[in-house]
Image (spheres, coloured by chain):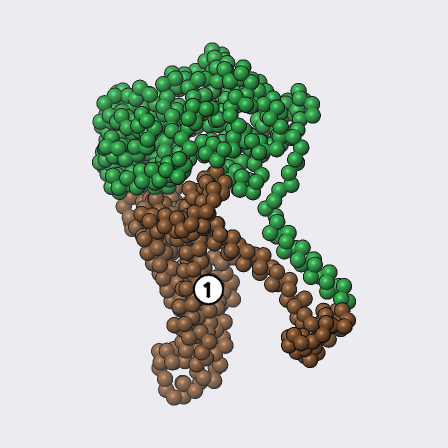
Amino acid sequence: MRNRVLATGAATLAMAMGLTACGGDSDSGDGKTIKLVAADYGDKASNASKKYWADVKKDFEAENKGYKVDVQVINWNEIDKSVKNMIQAGNQPDLLQTGGYADKVADDLLYKADEVLSPKTRENLIPSFAKAGEVDGTQYGIPWVSSSRVMFYNKAVLEKAGVKTPPKTWDEVAAAAKKIKSSKAAETPYALPLGPEETQGETMMWELGNGGGYTDASGKYTLDSAQNVETFDWLQKNLVKPGLTYTNPASTDRKTAFADFAAGKVGMLNGHPSLIQMAKDGKVDYGVAPIPGKTGPLDSTLGVADWMMAFKDGGAEKEGVKKFLDFTYSEKMLQFDEMYNLMPVTQDALKEMQTNGKHKDLEPFFEVLPNAKFYPLGDTSWDVISAEMKKTGGKAVSDDPKAVLGDLQKKAESAAAENK
Amino acid sequence: MSLKAPPPPADTGRGRSGRAPRPVSRRSGIARLGPLPWIAPVILLILAVVIWPVVELIRTSFLNISIAGIVRGSAGTDKYKKLFEETDFGAVLLWTVIWTVVVVTVTMLLSLALAQLFNQKFPGRTLTRWALIAPWAASVLMTAIGFKWMLNQTAGVLNTLMLDLGLIDNSKDWLGKPETAWPWMMAVAIFVSLPFTTYTLLAGLQTIPHEVYEASRIDGASSWQTYRHITLPMLRPAFLIGVVINLINVFNSFPIIWAMTQGGPGYDTSTTMVFMYKLKETDIGESAAMSVVNFAMVVVLVLIFLKVSRWNEED
């Protein structure tokens, strides 16, 4: 009888302990297992990144007996949170493929790129991207894929509105948008997505057009510089207030803008290569042009790269990680780029894609890539600032731009000070 | 086990006095614990799922945690300072109060009427009573997403309906700006709070004895007098329960706002709960500080309410 009482108590206690302990993960522990966490680039089951990585895993394990690859693919909305939880729980992956890397450098979690890449793989990286992977002159971030931005326009809409050539300057954008609106050629003349999804991208494309941007030459943040404030003043006065774009750009995400363009409801917008397929699927006859600036088209557009990084405390031995990266970067790079119509970061894949004739529609993007400007990716506080911009940056087209950008600048300065 | 008798009181009395010699047998040792073995599982469970998270939460709010998730040491009260200095903090607090007060007040008023209605005898009462459960039975998140799409500017049925009825002359982006998003979200919050509240009040109404009504009728009370002087006072316990539970629920409400606007643009449609969630993206410590403030506010809110309504006093 007494024993049963004790047993019940013990069982409940064990249950309660179990509840508190369920955060811990069983680690496979041995140095031959490489744990990879990657983002999902697919938009449907048939092109999920899980498929790509399963293929890489199979081929790598066949070629390198004894090694095991443990892949976990997480969607873009969750990956940062999941990785943060893994790090907090002391359960770091060996390799991570996601959107940013510098915040991890600040905490000294990553291997330097030359520790986990053979010289051959390193030399194969396109220099401008390798450079964007540097923090204070040392490369940590290994570029994975890239894209550049151009302006897309709907040919039928522009024709119906009587716009002969795609706009090259801001004033021409406003004039074309006005014509589209008055001729009712499209519901949204210019799509300006400043919602949480990609505020930092659209913002930078417009600010570059006015000689602005996020940092000055020395790398100090200048989010509320006169040029940037002027940019948002212009947008507010010439596109938002006259109703030439969405009513509430600050709550409109890029995916809405892309979907609207593919449905023929948008005249013009800034986009990246994945819009090509969407437009084709929607049977929209589109054209592309350099992004308009205040006085003329941008000579350097926004370039975006996603990153691969190797954690020091992942548990796998460094040699295995190196083997895996060398294998993937030399054998499997092109497959990924072609699978998603994204742009390569290695020289051999770039050459292949430019010459094999299968990627004619990417040509305008290749053209602007060499001069592309990046976010301040190598700054260890960029990830915080980018997250802050996503939350409130879009309000600069509805509220007072100086106040909104000023607030962001204050946050950027304190984030930078904290990371010093 | 069921045969075991409760420990003799003398036994525990001796145990408490502390003068007793060491128990001679193990049996009396166990017995001395009294009901502890029976309630221990519950206590452990509460410790594990209630107390421990609160302690951990408070501890986190004094830590400096990098965006990558590494603890960089103590932050002292910095995170609280940072939180109170947020430009939008004041507005978020104000909106939280407005949100809670409006949703709870309207819910209670509507529920009073609904409960009264459902307490009458009319054909189809059972069916309508069942129908009232629907908004409650459906997941709140699902309801909120449903409303989000119904309000969609280009594809939403509500926009089409209002256009066809001539209520508006061009379709509106209802959830895109705070002035229109707040009322809609409040409407959804009220919609999902009604069933529970109505049923609580309905249960309350059914406990009022018929004799009291009969007596008042004989005394010639008008129906309004009956309602004010009999129904409302006797409904008090049920009404108070409804208010307290709704206060806590609405104050802590997250899925409706998150599904419909994500608290945006900026923080314009955020309550402190949503604000806390959004802070987590940039600073976990600050987010934890917000949680602690939230926790304190809800405790204070309920205490004040119970004090004011003299919770334990029976009329």
Q: Which residue is mark 1?
A: B245
Furthest residue to the top? Answer: A355
Secondary structure found at label 1: helix
A220 left or right, relative to B202: left
Chain letter, colour green: A
**Residue at point 45% right, 78% down?**
B313
Q: How far across and how far down the image is residue B238, in percent?
A: 46, 72
Out of A87 and B273, give the one closest to the viewer.
A87
**Residue at point 49% right, 52% down?**
B59
Out of B112 and A139, give the one closest to the viewer.
A139
Q: Is residue A96 above or below residue B193?
A: above
Q: Is residue B1 above or below residue A278?
A: below
Quarter of the rendering containing residue A363: top left
Q: Residue B287, can we see it? A: no
A81 left or right, relative to A387: right
Amino acid found under the numbered disc labelled 1: Ile
**Residue at point 64% right, 22% down?**
A59
Quarter of the rendering containing residue B172: top left
> How busy is the neighbourhood of tag 1: few (under 14 within 10 Å), some, or many (20 plus)?
some
| The C terminus of chain A sits in image quarter | top left
Q: How far across and how far down the image is residue A84, in percent?
A: 51, 40
Out of A251 and A89, give the one closest to the viewer.
A89
| The N terminus of chain A sits in image quarter | bottom right
Chain B shade: brown
Number of numbered discs overlaid on the protein picture: 1
Q: How far across and how far down the image is residue A298, in percent?
A: 30, 22
Q: Could you tell me which chain the residue with mark 1 belongs to?
A: B
Q: Residue A230, can we see it? A: yes
Q: Is residue B50 above or below residue A336?
A: below
Out of A44 and B116, give the one closest to the viewer.
A44
